[in-house]
Amino acid sequence: MSAELLPAVPPISAKIVVSGSFGVGKTTLVGTISEITPLRTEARMTTASLGIDDREFLPAKTTTTVALDFGRVTINDDLRLYLFGTPGQDRFGFMWDGLVRGALGALILVDTRRLEACYRAIDYYESRALPFVIAVNQFADSPRHRLDQVRRALDVGPNVPLIRFDARDKESVKETLIRLLNLLLANINQPSSPLPSDGPRP
């Protein structure tokens, strides 16, 4: 059979989860990089969220993800990523288990104005031994701490990649996804023991 008649091999599909606290940029990231119109489950914020969702640094935010964000990006002819963004509020945390099922890795987004808000996501993925990259989404008014300072504040070891990026910039998001893929490939080529969990952070 000639090469021209060989059936095309479909790209490998991989599920990636995008996590983090309320308003950290998950929906923006998926919308920035997705090659299809992203699926969003945003709802208008109501008075029911008062006193629950911390909007101190997000006064203009009027909607919030209540289920998931979904997008797709083709890395090359051999690999296609499906991105699942988790809801950020604690009251929707019960949905995380379903969204994470089958995922190869996760991006945890961080806002340096609210570092304590991301402890829950880090604890969650550490306890499940799911590889993750921590991506500091640099907002215009957020403190520009050195990454080693952020690492100490988050209490994560050197085996966890930590980078700075902009969720609005396509190339920046792409570099972040490639960093996660490199981590996943390294884990495949050199298996390591599950990441330890020190329990909930204060």
Image: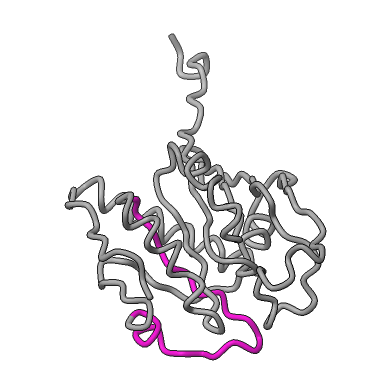
Taking depth in this image into account, of 134 and 7 the one nearest to the observer is: 134
Left or right relative to 134: residue 172: right
The answer to which quarter of the image holds residue 143 is: bottom right
Image quarter in which the N terminus is found: top left
Left or right relative to 69: residue 17: left
Residue 165 in the magenta stretch? The answer is: no
Q: Is residue 187 above or below residue 160?
A: above
The answer to which quarter of the image holds residue 179 is: bottom left
Q: Where is residue 6 in the image (x, y as percent from the top left)?
A: 48, 16
Taking depth in this image into account, of 129 and 4 the one nearest to the observer is: 129
| Number of numbered tags placed on the structure image | 0
Residue beneath the point at 43% across and 37% down: 102
The single residue placed furthest to the top in the displayed view is 1
Q: Where is residue 57 in the image (x, y as percent from the top left)?
A: 68, 82
Q: Position of residue 27 (x, y in %)?
A: 67, 59
Residue 133 in the magenta stretch? The answer is: yes
Residue beneath the point at 72% across and 60% down: 64
Image quarter in which the C terminus is found: bottom left
Stretch in magenta: 130-151
The scheme the figure's colours follow is: one colour
Residue beneath the point at 55% across and 42% down: 82
Left or right relative to 148: residue 94: right
Left or right relative to 192: residue 148: right
